[in-house]
Image (cartoon, rainbow, N blue to C red):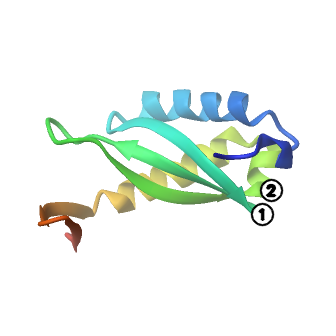
């Protein structure tokens, strides 16, 4: 899990604000889930759903500076950019127990 002690801003409150803004701007995004902090980055997952397809999550690392500043607008922009570019990757049905990915753009 992540350690909010590394950040000057209350991370839970900030991520709730960011998630609220994301959900209102992009219907594909279902949630964001913080994983851990490493060095000057917060690693999280952006979870998306397209129509009736299963939800899938993209990994993303955000810079500590933006989080410390509490810059919701920058965080939302970075996550929307990642979601848009991540949507160009399609999950291909797993062959046996492995996952394969195909770039569609």
When the figure is inspected, residue 89 is found, relative to residue 37, above or below; the finding is below
Q: CA distance from mark 1 to mark 2?
A: 8 Å
Circle 1 SS class: loop
Give the left or right position of residue 40, taking residue 96 as reference. right
Q: Residue drawn 41% across and 55% down?
A: 58
Within-10-Å neighbours for mark 1: few <14, some 14–19, many 20+? some
The location of residue 74, given as percent across then percent down, is 65, 49
Instruction: Check disc 2 and report its element: helix, strand or loop.
Output: helix
47 vs 75, left or right, is: left
Q: How many numbered marks are there?
A: 2
Q: On screen, 79 above or below 86?
A: above
Q: Position of residue 5 (x, y in %)?
A: 84, 43
- Asked if marks 1 and 2 touch (Cβ < 8 Å), the reply is yes
Residue lying furthest right: 8
Q: Position of residue 48 (x, y in %)?
A: 34, 43
Residue on which the image places disc 2 = 65
Q: Quadrant of residue 63?
A: bottom right
Crowding around mark 2 (Cα neighbors within 10 Å: few <14, some 14 to 19, many 20+) is: few
Closer to the N terminus: mark 1 or mark 2?
1
Please name the residue shown 60% across and 35% down the image: 18
Q: Quadrant of the C terminus?
A: bottom left
Residue under the image location 80 percent in, 33 percent down: 10
Horizontally, is 104 left or right of 11 in the view? left
Point out residue 82 in the picture as x, y percentages from the top left corner: 46, 58
Residue plotted at (49% across, 49% down): 45
Label 1 sits on residue:
40
**Residue 59 or 94: which is nearer the viewer?**
94
């Amino acid at each position: 899990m992540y350690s909010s002690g590394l950040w000057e801003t209350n991370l839970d409150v900030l991520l709730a604000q960011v998630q609220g803004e994301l959900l209102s701007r992009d219907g594909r995004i279902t949630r964001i889930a913080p994983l851990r902090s490493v060095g000057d980055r917060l690693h999280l997952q952006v979870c998306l759903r397209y129509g009736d397809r299963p939800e899938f999550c993209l990994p993303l690392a955000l810079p500590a500076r933006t989080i410390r500043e509490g810059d919701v607008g920058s965080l939302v922009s970075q996550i929307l950019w990642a979601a848009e570019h991540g949507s160009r990757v399609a999950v291909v049905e797993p062959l046996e127990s492995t996952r394969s990915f195909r770039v569609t753009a």
